[in-house]
Image (tube, helix red, strand yellow):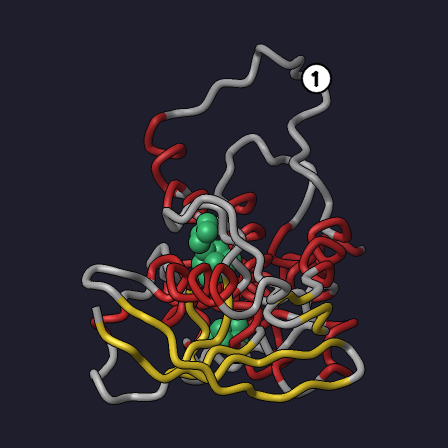
Amino acid sequence: MTLRQFKVWRGDASGGQLNDYKVEVNEGEVVLDVIHRLQATQEPDLACRWNCKAGKCGSCSMEINGMPRLGCMTRMSTFEEDETISITPLRTFPVIRDLVTDVSFNYEKAQEMPAFAPPADLAPGEYRMQQIDVERSQEFRKCIECFLCQNTCHVVRDHDDNKPAFSGPRLFIRAAELDMHPLDARHDRKEIAQQSQGLGYCNITKCCTEVCPEHIKITDNAIIPMKERVVDRRYDPLVVFGRKILRR
Ligand code: SF4
Ligand code: F3S
Ligand code: FES
């Protein structure tokens, strides 16, 4: 057991500050263990959201030494013994209290997105798809909705005014997943991403990919292929010619 130095943000929507604490740390522990010990021994009303403690529910997202991470998957051994560790709430979303933020932005954006829409003449139970199509989008279905990617993306991190027009990387992988789905026949996902979800705001900095705890290649496998296909369609002279013919 060692005593380690922490700074933890306490406050609410009206403001707050970093408070200093010394907390016991044992071998093998993660940051969430330390927060629980702090609640148990010094700050019983410290607010922190968590659920599974196994990196699967996506609840314990926070910023640790300024880096967006899952508290339950960040080992204390990651840090130097004498390092002060600061724990702050996600910066992109409004604070409710202490380490708990209001992430409803992400659910509102999900709601704006047209749902999976199979061909009208197929009844539930008649849906069939090839294994290869199942596998193509498997990576995107690993998303645990921790919203670390949403929190990190510079398009909205310090620019609240971009939020109405930008759905963010989590929703781009959902769009890519549906775009690859052979039975999602009634929507043009690339066009929706470009026109309504703000795909054009993304300048492929890849920060979202760097923080994803599920190691989803958000930028390379979802965003860039969608951007390429939107551009191809817009500027491909054959497509433009075909469109003109069809309009006649
Ligand atoms: Fe979290 Fe990754 Fe899903 Fe983004 S894509 S919400 S970082 S699991
Ligand atoms: Fe943002 Fe990821 Fe694009 S961080 S700018 S959505 S590559
Ligand atoms: Fe579920 Fe951390 S508590 S991901």
Residue topped by disc 1: 121
Residue at figure coordinates x 67%, y 59% from the top left: 106
Q: Position of residue 195 (x, y in %)?
A: 72, 66
Query: Residue 115's image quarter?
Result: top right
Q: Specify the amino acid type for callout 1.
A: Asp
Report the number of discs: 1
Q: Nearer the viewer, residue 214 or 189?
A: 214
Residue 38 percent across, percent down from the top left:
47, 67
x and y percentages locating residue 77 in the rendered image: 21, 71
In the displayed structure, 58 sits above or below 93; it is: above
Quadrant occupied by the C terminus: bottom right
In the image, residue 109 above or below residue 87: above
- Residue 226 appears in view: no
Q: Is residue 202 left or right of residue 77?
A: right
Q: In the rendered image of this protein, does residue 222 appear above or below residue 38?
A: above
Quarter of the image for residue 35 reads bottom left
Q: Nearer the viewer, residue 144 or 245?
A: 144
Quadrant assignment, res 71: bottom left
At x 59% / y 62%, what residue is drawn? Answer: 44
Residue extending furthest front?
Answer: 41
Residue shown at 45% from the left, 74% from the top = 68
Q: Position of residue 193 (x, y in %)?
A: 64, 61
From the image, which quarter does the N terminus lie in? bottom left
Q: Please, what secondary structure does the residue beneath circle 1 have?
A: loop
**Does residue 133 show up?**
yes
Q: Is residue 147 left or right of residue 32?
A: right
Classed neighbour count for the residue bearing mark 1: other residues with Cα under 10 Å, few (<14), some (14–19), many (≥20): few
